Image (cartoon, rainbow, N blue to C red):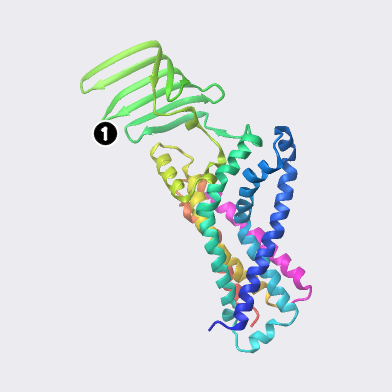
Amino acid sequence: MWTLLDRYLFKSYLKAFAFAVLIFTMISVVIDFANKLDDFQEEDIGIWQIFSEYYINFIPYINILLWPMYALITVVFFTSRLANTSQFIPVLNAGFSFRRFLVPFLMAATVLAGIHVVAAHYVVPNGNKERIKFENTYVWKHDGTSQTNNIHRYTDFPSTKIYMRFYRLKDSIGNDFLLEEHDGRQITRKLFARQIRWKERPNQWTLQDFVDRRIDGLDETLRRGVLLDTIFDFTPEDFYRRENLKETLNSFELLDFISKERERGASNFRLYEVEYHRRWADPFVLFILTIIGVAVAARKVRGGIGIHLAIGALIGALYVFFSRFGTQFAIAYDDYPVWLGVWIPNIIFTGVALIMMRFAQK
């Protein structure tokens, strides 16, 4: 039965959460604006453009990123107030068990988790397209990552594979280029060039000092030359990608991107798998931290809210540590399942939450 107390706790949790979002949003915007003010001034862009193209998308992004921490702080603060004003003990004396007391908190966490799922999978990535486009244009103009040494990838899986010993992004030149084509049974073509240079769009390249060997059963043809203009199914952008690309893809686009990168033999697709699994793991954290927060703050202690908030901050820091450790381990080791690396903090802290429930105020 949904009681008056349940409605009070449910509404109070959501109101306190909304207040925390408001406060931390203002703090985040002020800090971010201060850090980027010099870049904004250099580009001579107006306040309205900054707000409409950047901050209107930055606010959902930063909030979803910190959503679980908001929940922990809100629960600890609100429950600690109940405990320190001696409102919690009468509730338990009235026949409410600790688990029953948790119900309205978990219902509120369900609402927040639902919002988080929709936002993390679709709303925020779509907003990030504009936010990151703005950042790449006006702030991080020269930041990006390029694969430069020993490049192996498929351009048409599994029939066509390329290799380059070295690739230089600034002038789109690659050294020791090799292309291999297969018919499923044997190699049908090997094209080697000492140097490959991107010429023009869409995909035109110039080969220098090339050897083109074609194999058809027992027949073989060999062609050598100094220069050759040809078309390949790749562009310079395939060897250059900003790290924040994963943030601009909604979950459908992300899964499609991961599939294509796997087929092309790219080595960085696990980074994108981490992003996909994180979008499912983070909403679950809301339930875990809600339980932990109530269990910590429900007991009245000397020091009151300050002690409870300190414990909550410690728990949050430990969660972030385990989260970073798990994801980095998943990226670094190919035999290690990506989903397990992302979910390890949740598994560990679920155990912590169950233990703390057992020893919570009765």
Q: Residue at x 55, y 82 (%)?
A: 2
Q: Is residue 342 visible?
A: no
Q: Residue at x 45, y 52 (%)?
A: 337
Q: Is residue 198 left or right of residue 296?
A: left
- In this view, 149 is above or below 139: above
Q: Is residue 176 visible?
A: yes
Q: Main secondary structure of the magenta part?
A: helix
| Residue reaching furthest to the right | 303
The image shows a total of numbered marks equal to 1
Which of the 4 image quarters holds residue 297?
bottom right
| Residue reaching furthest to the bottom | 94
Packing grade of label 1 (10 A; few <14, some 14-19, many >=20) is few
Rendered location of residue 9, percent (x, y): 63, 76
- Depth check: give the residue in front, 88 or 34: 34
- In this view, 66 is above or below 310: above
Rendered location of residue 164, percent (x, y): 45, 25
| Residue reaching furthest to the left | 218
Rendered location of residue 360, percent (x, y): 63, 77
**Residue 59 falls within the magenta-colored stretch:** no
Rendered location of residue 329, percent (x, y): 53, 49
The secondary structure type at the circle numbered 1 is loop
Which of the 4 image quarters holds residue 79?
bottom right
**Residue 308 falls within the magenta-colored stretch:** yes
Q: In the rendered structure, which amino acid carries the disc numbered 1? A: Gly
- Depth check: give the residue in front, 289 or 194: 289
- Depth check: give the residue in front, 321 or 121: 121
> According to the image, label 1 marks what residue?
184
Q: Residue at x 70, y 52 (%)?
A: 28
Q: Is residue 312 left or right of residue 111?
A: right
Locate the C terminus by quadrant.
bottom right
Query: What is the magenta range?
Result: 301-329
Q: Residue at x 64, y 85 (%)?
A: 92
